[in-house]
């Protein structure tokens, strides 16, 4: 396999193990049908789907890198760090992610209390109907419930009105530390990648602080082409990757056929002048 920038790699998506709606097996088949050549399943704070994803990729004839997307508290905000190509059985990352997931149920109960005060009762039980991994109740599950119960017309509206900072269903949470998330991934043989940097609304100074701290902890990659970026941001973060000497990643962030604007494998390729993260992970690819 030619591991250059033109490879159709999709290294960011979610299954029912976190807040996606498809199984790892269905995602593998969908990625293969879309022409993806190298795939990674990156469930939020979870690697419980990795063995299934490895097997499903092999059955579909798809090259595979292990993956996860870790929620991190940084400068009073939540930043996502994607991990790729790590040993998914390394005890430290397994325990670290378990700790990061802890408290999601208590947070969900608090979210439901806030929503009840805003006139929406039963949201905890409602959201649970959409959850397949009881360890990973997410805002996305609440959003699906609120849409299906008729309170909002789509997921972005739910987040805007109910689930973002200052809104009735928002509950702040202490996620992993940047240093820990990057360390778990790196010490398990993988590469840590800043997910969708264009989504954080950071000032240039804050973004510089994130990138330099991330690199000081051993982080080596940044998402350039993602379903969360505009074409102008593909260009901006191409320059950022080159400026800082970061490995570039590409991924749809696909969650669901009904909800996601960007399907698996359909984004433009990385620019030729970038060094793709998969070039640094050749030895970690499952064939
Ligand atoms: P949580 O980890 O429980 O805080 O949930 C975060 C998830 O909510 C993200 O991974 C996205 O899938 C989803 N999300 C966040 N903001 C939005 C939005 N504006 N519209 C749709 N989904 C969103
Ligand atoms: Mn999500
Ligand atoms: Mn994310
Ligand atoms: Mn994601």
Image (spheres, rainbow, N blue to C red):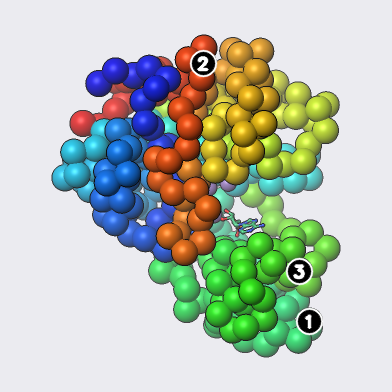
- Image disc number at residue 274: 2
Q: Is residue 271 above or below residue 158?
A: above
Residue 2: quarter of image: top left
Give the Cα distance between marks 3 and 1: 11 Å
Residues at circles 3 and 1 in contact by the CB criterion of under 8 Å: no
**Mark 2, secondary structure of its residue:** loop
- Image disc number at residue 118: 1
Within 10 Å of the Cα at label 3, are there few (<14), some (14-19), or many (20+) other Cα atoms? some
The x and y percentages for residue 191 are: 47, 26
Q: Quadrant of the C terminus?
A: top left
- Image disc number at residue 172: none
Looking at this view, is 257 or 52 the one in front? 257
- The residue where tag 3 is placed is 161
**Mark 1, secondary structure of its residue:** loop
Within 10 Å of the Cα at label 1, are there few (<14), some (14-19), or many (20+) other Cα atoms? few
Which residue is painted at 65% across and 18% down in the image? Answer: 239
Give the Cα distance between marks 3 and 2: 39 Å
Give the Cα distance between marks 2 and 1: 48 Å
Q: Is residue 208 visible?
A: yes
- Whether residue 165 sits left or right of residue 82 in the image: it is right
């Amino acid at each position: 396999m030619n591991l250059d920038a033109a490879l159709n790699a999709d290294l960011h998506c979610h299954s029912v193990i976190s807040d996606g709606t498809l199984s790892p097996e269905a995602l593998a088949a969908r990625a293969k049908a879309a022409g993806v050549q190298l795939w990674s399943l990156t469930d939020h704070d979870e690697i419980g789907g990795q063995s299934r994803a490895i097997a499903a990729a092999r059955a579909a004839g798809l090259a595979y890198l292990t993956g996860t997307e870790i929620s991190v508290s940084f400068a009073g905000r939540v930043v996502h760090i994607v991990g790729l190509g790590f040993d998914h059985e390394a005890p430290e990352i397994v325990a670290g992610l378990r700790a990061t997931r802890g408290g999601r149920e208590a947070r969900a109960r608090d979210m439901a209390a806030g929503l009840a005060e805003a006139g929406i009762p039963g949201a905890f039980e409602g959201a649970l109907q959409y959850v397949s991994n009881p360890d990973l109740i997410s805002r996305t599950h609440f959003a699906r419930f609120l849409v299906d119960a008729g309170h909002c017309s789509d997921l972005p509206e739910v987040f805007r009105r109910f689930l973002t900072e200052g809104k009735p269903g928002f509950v702040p949470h202490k996620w992993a530390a940047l240093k820990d998330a990057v360390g778990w991934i790196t010490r398990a043989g993988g590469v840590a990648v800043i997910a969708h940097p264009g989504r954080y609304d950071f000032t240039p100074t804050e973004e510089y602080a994130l990138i330099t701290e991330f690199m000081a902890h051993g982080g080596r990659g940044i998402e350039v082409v993602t379903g969360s970026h505009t074409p102008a941001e593909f260009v901006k973060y191409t320059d950022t990757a080159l400026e800082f000497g970061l490995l570039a990643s590409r991924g749809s962030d696909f969650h669901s056929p009904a909800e996601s604007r960007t399907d698996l494998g359909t984004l433009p390729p990385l620019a030729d002048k970038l060094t793709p993260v998969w070039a640094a992970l050749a030895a970690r690819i499952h064939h």
